[in-house]
Image (cartoon, grey):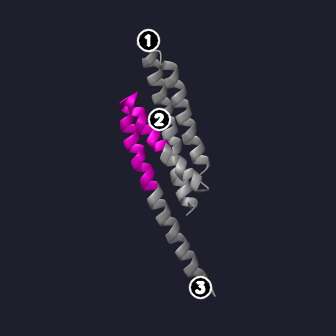
Amino acid sequence: MTPGTLTRRLCATTLLAQAMSVFFGTLVAWRLGQTNDDPRAGAYLWGGVVLTAVCVVAAGALRGRLGILLGWLAQLLTLAAGVVLPAMLVVAALFGFLWWLCLTQGMRMDRLTAERAAAADVEGD
């Protein structure tokens, strides 16, 4: 099932807010890596930028099922980022819950809107 208008709006808003949080977390991990002379600091930066891009691309691709799959991928990768920066576990929990909530409730509201529109068409005939 492809997401409806309300589902797309709710989920895209969640993913864009997540992208900003991930980006700022990326900057924290990168600077901590540089401060501790961690040779992986550059990888933290590029990995976080890629994850930020996945969030943004998923928000734009929500017109089809690919956007939903990319959204779930973004949630899993954000959770995995908790290995590098434990604070990302909190971000992953919050946005994972928001993603699930927006997806389920948005689809429910889109279905109810379609049912009401169909009932109004039947009554109008």
What's the distance in space between the residues labelled 2 and 1, CA to CA?
Answer: 24 Å
What's the distance in space between the residues labelled 2 and 3, CA to CA?
Answer: 46 Å
Give residue 31's position: percent from left, percent from top: 46, 18
Which-is-in-front pick, marks 3 and 1?
1
Give residue 78's position: percent from left, percent from top: 44, 38
Q: Which residue is mark 3?
A: 122
Q: Earlier in the sequence, mark 2 or mark 1?
A: 2
Please say if the residues under marks 2 and 1 sit with CB atoms less than 8 Å apart: no
Asked whether residue 14 appears in the rendered view, the answer is no
Q: Earlier in the sequence, mark 2 or mark 3?
A: 2
Q: Amino acid at mark 3?
A: Val
Front-most of 65 and 15? Answer: 65
Q: Amino acid at mark 2?
A: Ser
Q: Residue at x 52, y 24 (%)?
A: 45
Which-is-in-front pick, marks 2 and 1?
1
Q: Which residue is mark 2?
A: 21
Q: Residue at x 44, y 24 (%)?
A: 29
Which residues make up the magenta segment? Answer: 74-102
* Badge 1 element: loop
Q: Residue at x 40, y 40 (%)?
A: 92
Residue sticking out furthest to the bottom? 125
What's the distance in space between the residues labelled 3 and 1, CA to CA?
Answer: 69 Å
Q: Earlier in the sequence, mark 3 or mark 1?
A: 1
Asked whether residue 68 appears in the rendered view, the answer is yes
